[in-house]
Image: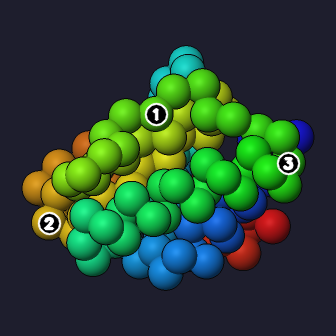
Amino acid sequence: MEPIELTRLMTEAAEEKAADDTLVLDVETLVGYTSYFVICSGRSGRQVQAIADHVVRHMRTEYGYRPMATDGLGIKANWVVLDFGDVVMHVFREEERALYDLEGLWQDAPRVALEQAS
């Protein structure tokens, strides 16, 4: 599956659990380990957990894709990272997203409009 299609499917799965402010960054020319970052938010740790769990389950059951690694899953779930190789998804609680400001850190990365990801 092409990385942009994987990105679109993961983003759609996150939005099924009401992920907020979803942003896709094209980082392929900036890093050597992935093509896209997906950044989204949940309003609580419980919602962050639900978003991440749903993305993992949906990608596994519908498409046979499993993350290469995950981090942050658990009780607090303030920031969960799902590494699917070509796509790395960051699911934040709103406060942590503002604190760590990945959008600012990766300001040189082109933003991909969600319509372009289909």
Neighbours of disc 1 within 10 Å: few (<14), some (14-19), many (20+)? some
Q: Is residue 34 in view from this perspective?
A: no
Position of residue 26 measured from the top left corner of the image (x, y, whole percent): 57, 46
Element under label 3?
A: helix
Task: Give the residue displayed 67% in from the left and 70% down from the top.
Answer: 12
Label 2, label 3: how many angstroms apart (C-alpha)? 32 Å
Q: Earlier in the sequence, mark 2 or mark 3?
A: 3
Position of residue 46 measured from the top left corner of the image (x, y, whole percent): 31, 67
Element under label 2?
A: helix
Label 1, label 2: how many angstroms apart (C-alpha)? 21 Å
Quarter of the rendering containing residue 33: top right
Drawn side of residue 86 relative to residue 41, left or right: right
Q: Which of the labelled discs sits on residue 63, or is there none?
A: 3
Drawn side of residue 80 relative to residue 82, left or right: left
Q: Quadrant of the N terminus?
A: top right
Which one is in front, 100 or 50?
Answer: 50
Q: What residue type is labelled 3?
A: Tyr
Q: In which quarter of the image is the C terminus?
A: bottom right
Find disc 2 in the rendering and name its residue: 95
Q: What residue type is labelled 1?
A: Thr
Find disc 1 in the rendering and name its residue: 70
Element under label 1?
A: strand
Q: Is residue 38 above or below residue 68?
A: below
Which one is in front, 21 or 91?
Answer: 91
**Do residues under tags 3 and 1 come within 8 Å of each other at their CB atoms?**
no
Q: Is residue 19 in view from this perspective?
A: yes
2 vs 3, front mark? 3
Position of residue 41 measured from the top left corner of the image (x, y, whole percent): 35, 68
